[in-house]
Amino acid sequence: MNILIFGASWNNRGDESAIRAMIDELRIKCPNVKYRIYFSGMNVSSVPYEDVEIVPRHYRVPRRKIFKRLLYDISVKTGGKINLLPGTNVISKEDNRMAFKKFVEAVKWCDLALSAPGGPNISDIYKSYAVLDHIDIIRHHKKPYAFYAPSMGPFKQYKKRIKKVLKNAEFVYLRESISAGYIKGLYEELETKVTLDSAFQHKFDENKYSKQLEEYKALSDYLKKYEKVIGITITDLQWHGIHKGIETEERISTSFESFIEYLTNKGYGIVFIPQLFGEKKDRDYMARFANKDCFVVDDEHDCYFQQYLISKLFAVVGMRYHSNIFSAKMGTPFVSVAYEQKMKGFAEKVGLSEYCFDIGELSSDVLIKHFEQLEKNYDEYKEKLLDIKEWCKKESYKTTERVIQVIEEKGLDK
C-alpha cells in the first residue's frame, strides 16, 4: 500500500524525530508500505530513507493578489484537473505548476494520507493554512486521510472549513490536550484522542550513537571534563507568528546570558544543542551565548544522536519543545520555556507543570528559580521520568496503532 505524508516540516531535529519515529514504527508492522512525503516548509533535498520519495513543494499565493489567488483556488478546487498555478516571488509559473502536478499525482497514488506530526499548522498562530488546500485536493480525489498527533489551534479564521476537514478525517489524534480543547470549542461533537508526541515511541540503536559520540572527540572530551553538564536550547522567536519582536528578543538574550553565567560560576559544563539544520540554522545564534566554559554541538548530527547525547547530561533547559521531549524520553530532568500550547499541554499530561513556565514570564530570576527547584528535587524528578518512560512510549504508539487499524479495516494491507 501507499501512504502520503503531508503537512510535514523538516530541517528541525524535532520535526525530524517525530516523522522518523512514525515511519520507523509503521515499518515494523507494515513493512510493505511505500511512502511519499510532501514538506510544507522550505525545500528538502533528502531524507534518511532511500526508498521514500520527496514530493516537490508548490507555493500558495497570498490572498491580497486577487487574480493570481483565483487561479490558485481554481487549481485546488478542481483537485488539479485544471492546473493554473501562477508563479510567486520564489518560483516560476512553470516550476510551480510542475510541483503542483507532482503533489496531485502523489494524492492519486496514495491509499491513505497522513497529516504529519508537528506544530499547529492549522491555527491562527502562523496563518498559513496551506494544509487546508492540501486536504481539499485529497478530499476531491476521495482519499482517506487522518491527523497523526499534531498540535492544532487556536481557531478564529476558516472555522467552517476547518470543521469540515476535521469531520471527514478517519481520525483526529493530538499530542496534547490544549489542542483538543481548541477543537472542542470549534466542534463539540467531534471525537478526538490525545496521545503523546510521536518521538516517544521509537527505540533507536543506542550502541550506534554511543560510538558516534565517542568518535566526536571534541564533544566526548568536553563531557568528561565536567561532573555535571547542562544542555541548553535557545531561539529568538523572530520566526514566530505571535511572539516575534525586539522586546522579546532582547528579553531572551539578557535572561539567558545571566543564566549561563550563573551556571558556569557554579561549575556546570554547558552544551548548546542546535535544533535547526539545512538552509536555516540556529547554531551560530546559540554560539553567541557561549563563553569559554561552554560547547556548541555541530548541527549535522541527527535527532537520535541528540537523544542519546541528552541521556548523558545532568539536565536540560529548553526553549525548543523537542529538546524537552528528548529529555523526557531519555530520563533527563528538564526546565521548559513554553511559547505554544504543545509544551504546556505535554507538561500537564505527564505531571511536570512545575518545571514549565510561559515565555511571558521569562527572566534570569525565573530560570534560576526553576533550575534550583530541579536541583533540589533531582532524585525525585529522575525517578518520576523513569516511572513514566514506558507509559509515554505506549501513549505515543497509540497513534501508530490507530493507523494500522485503519489500514486493516479498509483492506489496504492486501
Image (cartoon, rainbow, N blue to C red):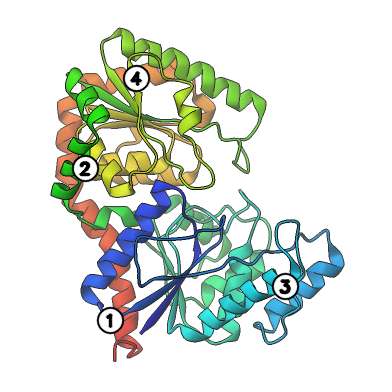
The residue type indicated by label 1 comes to Asn
Question: Mark 4 falls on what kind of element?
Answer: strand
Residue found at x 21% / y 71%: 28
Question: Mark 1 falls on what kind of element?
Answer: loop
Report the side of 308 relative to 316 (left or right). Answer: left
Q: Nearer the viewer, mark 3 or mark 1?
A: 3
The residue type indicated by label 4 comes to Cys
What is the spatial separation of the Cα atoms under label 3 and label 2, in whole angstroms? 44 Å
Residue found at x 76% / y 78%: 84
Question: Mark 2 falls on what kind of element?
Answer: helix
Q: Nearer the viewer, mark 2 or mark 1?
A: 2
- In the image, 74 versus 226, the foreground residue is 226
Q: Tell me where residue 233 appears, x and y as whole percent.
A: 41, 32
Which is more N-terminal, label 1 or label 3? 1
Q: Tell me where residue 267 appears, x and y as whole percent.
A: 25, 11
Name the residue that disc number 1 marks. 32
Q: Toward which corner of the image does residue 357 lie, by quadrant?
A: top left
Position above or below: 250 against 71:
above
What is the spatial separation of the Cα atoms under label 4 and label 1, in whole angstroms? 46 Å
What is the spatial separation of the Cα atoms under label 4 and label 3, in whole angstroms? 49 Å
- Label of residue 212 in the image: 2
Report the side of 202 relative to 86 (left or right). Answer: left
Which is more N-terminal, label 3 or label 4? 3
Q: Nearer the viewer, mark 4 or mark 2?
A: 2
What is the spatial separation of the Cα atoms under label 4 and label 2, in whole angstroms? 20 Å
User: Which residue appears farthest toward the right when viewing the image?
Assistant: 67
Residue found at x 63% / y 52%: 124
Query: For the residue carrying disc 3, how many other residues have a C-alpha within 10 Å: few (<14), some (14-19), or many (20+)?
Result: few
Query: For the residue carrying disc 4, how many other residues have a C-alpha within 10 Å: few (<14), some (14-19), or many (20+)?
Result: some
Disc 2 and disc 1 in contact, CB within 8 angstroms: no
Name the residue that disc number 3 marks. 94
